[in-house]
Amino acid sequence: MSKGQQTREAVLEAAVAAASTTGLSAISIGELARTVGMSKSGLFAHFESKENLQIEVLRSAVAHFIAEVVAPALRKPRGEARVRALFENWFAWSSNPAMPGGCLFIAAASELDDQPGPVRDYLVASQRDWLGALSQAIRIAMDEGEFRKDLDPDQLAHDLYSILLAYHHFSRLLHMRGARERAFRTFEQLMESARVPRAPRRTVSRKPTRRAKRS
Amino acid sequence: MSKGQQTREAVLEAAVAAASTTGLSAISIGELARTVGMSKSGLFAHFESKENLQIEVLRSAVAHFIAEVVAPALRKPRGEARVRALFENWFAWSSNPAMPGGCLFIAAASELDDQPGPVRDYLVASQRDWLGALSQAIRIAMDEGEFRKDLDPDQLAHDLYSILLAYHHFSRLLHMRGARERAFRTFEQLMESARVPRAPRRTVSRKPTRRAKRS
DNA sequence: CCCATTTCCGCACGACCGTGCTATTTTGTT
DNA sequence: AACAAAATAGCACGGTCGTGCGGAAATGGG
């Protein structure tokens, strides 16, 4: 790998970490240059503009996401196992130490949701791809006969996504203990209700343990 | 109302609108002054600092939230009706034209989740209050006998919240059609599974004491 | 080792930022 | 109408921002 590529990747790594905590638009070229130990203009030369830097940051995160979340799951057998692997890898990804502020895509999503431009366009496209991959894995599980035929794969993908959104919200902002367990419990419920029914069962949210008294 | 209060509220109204689209930290005093038609220093004199302005923005939004979401719901009868009103008002609130970028709290949440300080502290406190109010309404519905006794009110409040988070994400970022319907469908499912079970609607014979035990 | 190419730095620019200080205008009360 | 108080404007300050340009330094294939 050439020297240029080397520093370029170092910059992007630092930028992903910064963007996950303070947001994509809050990463400044000066501060980024300071943290990787080079000059502002030297860093800037690698990216024609800040907007382009932001896109490259997202592109870098997508590459990592595919390598660490999607690809390993695709090596799992078709069916629920693969869906499960996608979710669990995704969950692990969103608490990756390389992103101290949590999942970059979730952070970027609420930041860019009303700011048109190429950065937003790229994020939207990648999110669509990811949702499509999720739906596809679910559809395969239906074809394999593990999930019920009348399942709506898009709805389940949507519900899986909302688990992660809620986990992100409650664990990062509110520092809610047990958020992880709550997320996985909801996940298991969804899996349970997606499987072909063996015996009729009811899906309700039951209290897990005795709750501590809280106003 | 004195002149000072008048302009102060005009400023806050514009600031809430701006913050909902571009974020709390992206609102600049200069631009804000431009949109309300006054000088930077004249505007600044109303708030001792930008950080204080951000807190006042949140405080203003909370006041509106209580007036438009919580208070009307508290006038509904105790039970599911009140829970339903809370959710529906909340939903309507998050597409209020005064916040063109969607719910300010959701936007602020992912922006501040890793940035300690008084602004974050205030947001966290207000979110805790809101979750508490939701849980409380659910608990009342349990006491009234409309919701099942083994329900976990915090879990249901959590699930309601995740509906809104998902709706926000999918409708604002991905412009997903049918997001609203999907949200309300999930809401109705949650209500259905929270209610005390009625007589079995299927004519399958069921032994009365053979309910599933806690696994 | 040479030398073209790539990589990086120093410096400067205009713009906008938040924030004070001092006037000036507007408001509201007597 | 007079006048104290409140509200707003003018102006300036030190900083940081993104972005260019020219030159210095490092790299790496022959």
Image (cartoon, coloured by chain):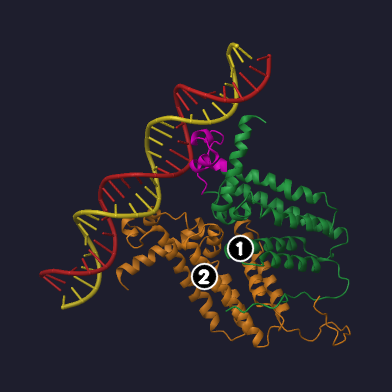
Chain colours: A green, B orange, C yellow, D red
Instruction: State the image quarter where residue B53 is shown.
Output: bottom left
x and y percent of residue D26 in the render?
57, 25
x and y percent of residue A17 in the render?
59, 48
The quadrant of the image that shows the N terminus of chain B is: bottom left
Q: Return the chain for callout 2.
A: B
Q: Amino acid at mark 2?
A: Ser
Q: Return the chain for callout 1.
A: A
Residues marked 1 and 2, same chain: no
Residue at (77% x, 74% y) in the render:
A203
**Alpha-carbon distance for marks 1 and 2?**
14 Å
Q: Which mark is residue B126?
A: 2
Q: Which mark is residue A4?
A: none
The magenta span reads A26-53
The quadrant of the image that shows the C terminus of chain B is: bottom right
Magenta segment, prevailing SS (helix, strand or loop):
helix
Q: Is residue B70 left or right of residue A59?
A: left
Instruction: State the image quarter where residue B107 is shown.
Output: bottom right
> Is residue B87 positioned above or below C16 on the image?
below
Q: Secondary structure at mark 2?
A: helix
Does residue B97 show up?
Answer: no
Residue at (67% x, 61% y) in the render:
A164
Q: Is residue B40 left or right of residue A29?
A: left
Q: Secondary structure at mark 1?
A: helix
Residue at (54% x, 43% y) in the render:
A51
Residue at (57% x, 84% y) in the render:
B76
- Report the residue marked by disc 1: A169
